[in-house]
Image (spheres, rainbow, N blue to C red):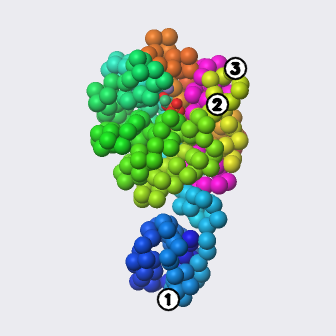
């Protein structure tokens, strides 16, 4: 439910409304608008005396939120959520490009990748230290040693780091190093993990599960946001279909669908959604044309030696060419790709 305050409502009236709602066992989240403030009420609202709240001083009216996700919905917040990642205002007219290897493999590999993607125009560095692999015998990531290398790469390049956290009991450790916590496709509905990252002050890159609907993704985001963390980037990374020509099928529809239904920024991962370098740039262009707020792309200095996802990882020069093309599409769309 939303409690829409009057334009002239005072801070005390707002605080009284919040206290009264919370005393009835629900949680509140305030959107401070230019004109008026709106209080989002979530939790079990069955016991809430809606009429009494509507009559409190400073309250204009109350309104139910029809979507199953509440705080993540555009119905609740009309304006885009905008937050800063390395000087790029994500969710505004600016496009954020995240790039780097699938896995952190060694100091030399990571630093070479980091300098190269920065040079080509990336704003943030990706790299997995904890890897969700289909086989338990495949490389599982360097763990904390990988996080230390990411922190060193940030120190040397100034780029913030995006890295995956796979389990609730890893959140504290990964959050010590990461700027953005990535939730992988396989963990999109790991609700304990979503609660845990929702309690941190780190931005979250939430990837769509490979068999999840756009609504499932938004419900997952609701877990994070209802814990108080509003800095969420949603990420389309391809879904499983009957098509075998590509690793996954990019659901390009998801970009305008999500942009219509949520105020959260929407990203696309053209590497995992295609699985083949030959298609990555086309899908990166399509993402920006469809209205995406950013991209996350796999780049490896020597893809043929990559321990994971080599077939979809760009060489630095291929990535640089993709960035140029993305700039052109962004410009056509009236958007900017900030240069550092
Ligand atoms: C990744 O980003 O390397 C990754 C494992 O992605 P996803 O969770 O989308 O498969
Ligand atoms: Mn990967």
Numbered badge on residue 200: none
Q: Name the main secondary structure of what is drawn in magenta.
A: helix
The structure residue drawn at horizontal position 55% and vertical position 45%, both measured from the top left corner, is 234
Secondary element at image label 3? loop
Numbered badge on residue 57: 1
Place of residue 120 in the rendered image (x, y in percent of width and height, measured from the top left): 51, 27
Q: Earlier in the sequence, mark 2 or mark 3?
A: 2
Relative to 39, residue 336 above or below: above
Residue 261 magenta-highlighted: yes
Span colored in magenta: 258-283
Place of residue 14 in the rendered image (x, y in percent of width and height, measured from the top left): 45, 79
Crowd band around label 2 with a 10 angstrom C-alpha radius: few (<14), some (14–19), many (20+): some
Q: Nearer the viewer, residue 152 or 197?
A: 197
Residue 165 falls in image quadrant = top left
Secondary element at image label 2? loop
Q: Nearer the viewer, residue 183 or 137?
A: 137
């Amino acid at each position: 439910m939303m409690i829409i305050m009057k334009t002239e409502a005072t801070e005390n009236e707002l605080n009284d409304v919040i206290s009264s709602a919370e005393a009835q066992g629900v949680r509140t989240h305030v959107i401070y608008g230019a004109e008026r403030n709106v209080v989002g009420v979530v939790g079990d609202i069955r016991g809430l005396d809606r009429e009494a709240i509507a009559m409190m001083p400073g309250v204009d009216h109350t309104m139910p939120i029809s979507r199953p996700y509440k705080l993540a919905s555009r119905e609740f917040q009309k304006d885009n959520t905008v937050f800063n990642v390395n000087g790029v205002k994500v969710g505004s007219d600016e496009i954020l490009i995240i790039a780097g290897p699938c896995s952190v493999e060694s100091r030399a590999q990571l630093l070479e990748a980091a300098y190269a993607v920065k040079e080509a125009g990336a704003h943030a560095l990706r790299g997995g230290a904890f890897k969700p692999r289909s086989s338990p015998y495949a490389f599982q990531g360097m763990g904390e040693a990988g996080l230390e290398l990411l922190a060193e790469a940030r120190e040397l390049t100034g780029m913030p780091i995006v890295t995956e956290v796979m389990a609730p009991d890893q959140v504290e450790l990964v959050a010590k190093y990461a700027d953005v916590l990535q939730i992988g496709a396989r963990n999109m509905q790991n609700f304990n993990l979503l609660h845990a990252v929702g309690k941190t002050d780190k931005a979250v890159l939430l990837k769509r599960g490979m068999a999840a609907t756009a609504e499932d993704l938004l419900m997952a985001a609701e877990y994070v946001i209802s814990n108080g963390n509003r800095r969420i980037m949603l990420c389309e990374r391809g879904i499983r279909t009957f098509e075998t020509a590509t690793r996954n099928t990019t659901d390009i529809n998801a970009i305008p669908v999500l942009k219509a239904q949520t105020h959260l920024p929407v990203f696309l991962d053209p590497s995992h959604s295609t699985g083949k370098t030959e298609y990555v740039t086309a899908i990166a262009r399509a993402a920006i044309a469809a209205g995406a707020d950013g991209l996350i792309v796999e780049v490896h200095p020597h893809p043929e030696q990559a321990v994971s996802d080599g077939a979809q990882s760009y060489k630095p020069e291929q990535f640089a060419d993709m960035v140029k093309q993305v700039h052109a599409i962004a410009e056509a769309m009236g958007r900017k790709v900030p240069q550092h």
